[in-house]
Amino acid sequence: MRAAIPPRIKLEITLAYLATGNSCRTLQRLFRVSRPAISNFIPEVCDAIYEALQEYIKVPASEEEWKVIENGFRQRWNFPNCYGVIDGKHFVIHAPAHCGSEFFNYKRTNSIVLLAVVDDNYCFRYINVGCSGRQSDGGVFQQSSLSQALEYGLLSAGGFIVGDDAFPLKEYLMKPFSKVVLSKEQKVFNYRLSRARRIVENGFGIMVSRFRIFEKPIACLPETIYNKIIKTCCALHNYLRITSSNNYTPSGSLDEEDLDRGQMRFGSWRDLKVRFSPMEKVHSNHSAKSARNMRDQLCQYFMGEGAVPWQERMIF
């Protein structure tokens, strides 16, 4: 019998596949390993990577761990009582045979949805991947285990996560004012919330720009995409962000604000053509009065005790 392919070579090929998006045919020429062998072991290696790194993706298990995240948002992003930022993205895939419209989304492409909560350091703390693009974006959240946990008091009283108009306004989920004409206070609130929410955009953007497999529609079985490829890339993103942030996200990679001039310097990932779409915006007036009151109180806080010197420069 011929010698087995060494584990190191399998790992190198799998990482090259995720990082470059090269086809198995191209990888076959680069590594001199047969295409059937590559297509067979890549899912296995993805499983091994995720098993080894899944501890880097975890929902905080104690009040102290939650408080570390809240303190990060308070100190770095000037948004107190925030425990994470939620968003979802549609990752474009090749439609499987005989799937009909199961994966067909509002952008008229076929996709799989990744719903995620990101902490103050651009790391994924919760991921829910596998819903087909046909499902409404609000439905993806409502069906998630996170929604159920939040409803039953996952966060401490007064704590919340933030999101955009794709999500419902709740006491535990703050979103921006969506009216056409906004007061000064509402504009300031939207700016302060967008400053925190920009973290999740950068988290997704950095991951997709570093793992070029997402640059074009992924030609794998859906189960392989969401159970192996996307989950593995999320784990690798967190691992590299935590252990090698200077190399993984060098200066200029992330969005930065010029607070003196009131300008935004966008991260380099925004210049790349990444193959994912944001969740569809859903406008709804059916939020609870208590949630609206809570948002109004935050509005007043940001205009008073919680004001920062530059906020009015950033809204005009």
Image (cartoon, rainbow, N blue to C red):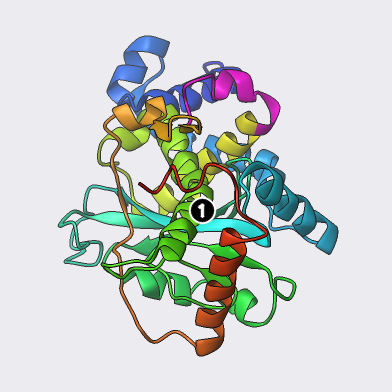
- Nearest the eye: 19 or 307: 307
For the record, the magenta segment spans 242-254
69 left or right, relative to 310 = right
**Can see residue 47?**
yes
Q: Residues within 10 Å of mark 1 (few under 14, many from 20)?
A: many
Whether residue 292 is situated above or below residue 209 in the rendered picture: below
The stretch drawn in magenta includes residue 246? yes
Give the image location of residue 160, x and y in percent. 62, 67
From where the camera sits, is residue 17 visible?
no
Q: Position of residue 74 (x, y in %)?
A: 69, 51
Q: For the residue marked with disc 1, what is the amino acid?
A: Arg
Q: Left or right? Give the position of 166 relative to 230.
A: left
Q: Could you tell me residue 239's position as x and y percent?
A: 64, 34
Look at 46% across and 57% down and name the residue there.
188
Residue at the (75%, 58%) spot, across then down: 66
Label 1 SS: helix
Q: Is residue 53 magenta?
A: no
Q: Which residue is mark 1?
A: 192
Residue 6 falls in which quadrant of the image? top right
From the top left corner, tell me how far across and down residue 46 is, in percent.
53, 38
Residue drawn at 60 percent across, 53 percent down: 307
